[in-house]
Image: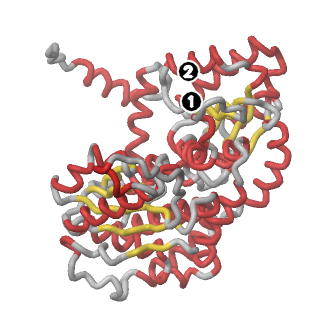
Amino acid sequence: MSHTLEWSRAWSGRLTGIDASAPLPELSALVERLRRECAAGELPFLTMPYRARLEADMATVLPRVQRYKHMLVLGIGGSALGARAMQQAFAPGQDGPEHEGPSLWIADNVCADRFEALLTKLKAEESVVVCISKSGGTIETLAQYFLVRDWLRAALGEAWREHMVVVTDQQKGFLREEARQHDLLSLEVPDFLGGRYSALSAVGLLPAAFLGIDWQALLDGAWDVARPLVEDAANLGQHPSLALARWAKALEDHGYSQLIFFCYIPQWATYGPWFAQLWAESLGKQGKGTQPVPAIGVTDQHSVNQMFLDGQRDKGCIFLTNARPPQGRSFGQDLPEKWAWLRGKPFGSLLEAEGLGTRMALCKNDVPLVHVEMGDIGPRAAGSLMLLLEAATVFTGWLMGIDPLDQPAVELGKRLANARLGAPGYAAEEADLAAYLATPPQRQGF
């Protein structure tokens, strides 16, 4: 069964009356831009020129890492969110009772207590560490790397090198220098592949493969969606990713400031945060963009859904479901009479009914909604969805007139943090910090 986008409720609310089938004035320019950037290698998430090399490298690296019981990933943002989504979707057993298979741990924040707990409880001899940074200079990741390197050395001596893998730029950056100096296993993050678009590269696929996930099926699914665009850019006008981009741009043009990503596939719930980074970091620029809001069905029916339904009318929704959800156990025939209508029904029918009810409620409250229904929820299907959303994000940025591949505002906070820690070369940021910290605090206790 194929995956589908269902549009019957998408052009509602303030979008009512827009002719989504009308010719797109910018189409010729977009097609030419797609053709040009693909040819220049600037959209590697779409063209995937790195696949052959990745497959060859994985054949060497995987046997080396799969002999360990634990994998500890050091990475933040795009270096972690894709791996976590794949782990929860396709290897959730780690969270269950008496798990005996490989375990993946992701250190994706600056939390001294959490980090100490990992290094205290993991056994170095049973663990492989994967340090991920495209630039090789992400301060949070490098800080973890320095501490983990000391931890491995203390336990293993010079054998620490056999327990470390770096995923970084092929030519430059501190981690590449470390790989050369210490003869560390390494995998490449290709040129032009920013972190939020890198999940379907070594960044996300090495942790996935370690867990036994069919990482090549993820790539196959992505290629299913990318192929029409790569083989002939003229297909862009009929591609579902451009349809999503046109809809998202219309939402913004008509005063919708938030985009709900409502996931009614429980196993895929962590794709919400992955999408949130992809959308926000790509499109939140120059005072433009819509705020992504991840939500989980049915959990968030009982929390934030009140705001979605009866708050400000500033929200559109991508609503994700599985056409064939697992059904699980069936209710017995001895339920109390008050609940007799559940007798004999499978547990999974509750998810289907809740999803339909929430979708209808959103539509009745004039929330423009695109229903994305997955024909199945295997790795190949996930790869297809991820590529669809990545392409839609890029094309939305093009329609907005912004660059969806950079993140200039994020860099300011990084520079200020470096200045605060005493890194050289940040004179302007040091002055800004001094002025900021000179403001008298106005504290109120509670």
| Quarter of the image where the C terminus is located | top left
Query: Measured along the vertical axis of the image, is residue 29 above or below residue 278?
Result: below
| Residue highlighted by disc 2 | 115
Left or right of 10 in this view: 424: right
| Quarter of the image where the N terminus is located | bottom right
Q: Whole-percent x and y of residue 97?
A: 60, 31
| Residue highlighted by disc 1 | 107
Residue placed at 16% from the left, 53% from the top? 311
Number of marks: 2
| Viewer-side residue, 96 vs 365 | 96
Query: Which three-letter amino acid code belongs to the residue tagged 2?
Result: Phe
Tell whether label 2 touches label 1 (CB within 8 Å): yes
Query: Measured along the vertical axis of the image, is residue 210 above or below residue 324?
Result: above
Describe the element under mark 1 as helix, strand or loop.
Answer: strand
The residue carrying pointer 1 sits among few (fewer than 14), some (14 to 19) or many (20 or more) residues within 10 Å by Cα, namely: many
Query: Which three-letter amino acid code belongs to the residue tagged 1?
Result: Ala
User: Could one spot residue 248 in this view of the protein?
Assistant: yes
Rendered image quadrant of residue 319: bottom left
| Viewer-side residue, 326 vs 382 | 326
| Viewer-side residue, 368 vs 205 | 368
Describe the element under mark 2 as helix, strand or loop.
Answer: helix
Q: Whole-percent x and y of residue 101?
A: 72, 35
User: How far is the residue under mark 1 from the one under mark 2?
Assistant: 7 Å
Q: Whole-percent x and y of residue 282?
A: 43, 55
Residue placed at 50% from the left, 18% from the top? 112
Q: What is the image's colouring?
A: secondary structure
Rendered image quadrant of residue 65: top right
Rendered image quadrant of residue 438: top left
Left or right of 421 in this view: 106: right
Residue placed at 44% from the left, 67% from the top? 372
Q: Whole-percent x and y of residue 46?
A: 60, 66
User: Could one spot residue 406 in this view of the protein?
Assistant: no
